Image (spheres, grey):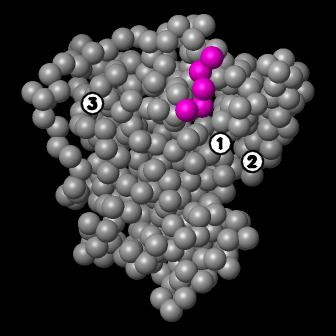
Amino acid sequence: MRRVTLLGATGSVGSSAVEVLQEGRERFAVHAVTANSDAAALAGIARRLRAERAVVADPAALAALRDALAGTGIEAAAGASAMQEAAGERVDVVLSAIVGAAGLAPTAAAVRAGSTIALANKECLVCAGPAFMALARRHGARILPVDSEHNALFQLIEGRDADEVSRFTITASGGPFRTWSAERLRRATPEEALAHPTWSMGPKISIDSATMMNKGLELIEAHHLFGLSPDRLDVLVHPQSIVHGLITFRDGSVHAEIGLADMKRPVSYCLNWPARGGCAARHLDLAAIGALTFERPDEARFPALALARSAMVHGSGAPTVLNAANELAVSAFLARRIPFTAIPETVARSLTEADRAGLLTEPETVEEAIGLDAAARDLAAQAVDNLAAIAS
């Protein structure tokens, strides 16, 4: 039996993980499951998976969680310290599926315990890439990528010499606004931005996909995860979301990882690695798909991707500021405070102000990255206020 802890059990990736764990009940024993505040949903998951412990980040949800788990023998806890305690207990695999910078501290606790990390929280590498990877090396924690694109690259280069590869390419669906004009983008609503054409994801990641910031964050993640220089990383827009990653060898050969858009596949791969376990993900029928198309991303209409590329090249805390400002801007857009096109504008203004304030220095520890994230959020809040005033 492989012992597993699931951080972020109620989100979109967490839901896929729950299905994989339930299907593989004979192979997995669940130590802990966590969520932000949805006590009822978390209690249901804990019961289904027969978890030993359930933890909510929001202390106000503890009473509801305890009531929902009464008589089960499953321990209930709440708060930031309880989250880190659950994550920091050594197990075989910790699947980190918490969305946003909130996942950084508990995932770091899991790294310090030496557990293998199945990483679906890209912010760990965007906010604190060098520090996070150094922490993993120091504690002997293996990092397995769950994001479909990075999981594809991991499968493609496993057992190979990365120096034989000239280019690593991740794909983007293009989101719901792939064919929209710049003028139409300025009038986009939250409902339209959340309507992703191929993937079922939570609100924050769905908006990131619509702006293409998600792909920029994934470039930064790949840069740190695989130790690749920015000039070896590329993005292709692929609306069918069948090809998830490609590697181009120095002799011109191209290898690709392909499959239907279903997060159960990469989740199962990481939970069972180095073996391949079976899961009930749908299988690909290429004849039924018929055609696969590819195009270059338009960074003029989607400047978030260019901002992320620039932050990746600059380093020195710029990715941390980029991510913090983006999280604030996405929340403001969903609250209808700013227009869709003000999301990358918020990020750009925050990066400029952070540079002026002398904040763009590389965090040497995860704790320093969390501190820079907080400072960047203050700058982003000011940018949001200014842009909201203009929009009104």
The correct choice, above or below, for 362 with respect to 39 in the image is above
Residue 370: mark: 2
x, y (%) of residue 136?
54, 53
Residue stretch rendered in magenta on the structure: 187-191
- CB of mark 2 within 8 Å of CB of mark 1? yes
Q: Main secondary structure of the magenta part?
A: loop
Residue linked to disc 3: 242
x, y (%) of residue 80?
71, 66
Give amino acid for label 2: Ile
63 or 346, nearer to the observer: 63
Q: Could you tell whether 228 is left or right of 105 in the image?
A: left
Mark 1 neighbour class, 10 Å CA radius: few under 14, some 14 to 19, many 20 or more = many
Q: Secondary structure at mark 2?
A: helix
Give amino acid for label 1: Ala
Q: How much space separates mark 3 and mark 2, taking CA atoms?
A: 35 Å
Front of the two marks 3 and 1 = 3
Give amino acid for label 3: Ile
Residue linked to disc 1: 128
Q: Secondary structure at mark 1?
A: helix
Mark 2 neighbour class, 10 Å CA radius: few under 14, some 14 to 19, many 20 or more = many
Q: Residue at x 53, y 38 (%)?
A: 205
Q: Residue at x 62, y 45 (%)?
A: 100
Q: Earlier in the sequence, mark 3 or mark 2?
A: 3
x, y (%) of residue 375?
84, 39
Residue 24 lies in what quarter of the image? Answer: bottom left
Q: Earlier in the sequence, mark 3 or mark 1?
A: 1
Residue 25: within the magenta? no
The correct choice, above or below, for 174 with respect to 190 in the image is above
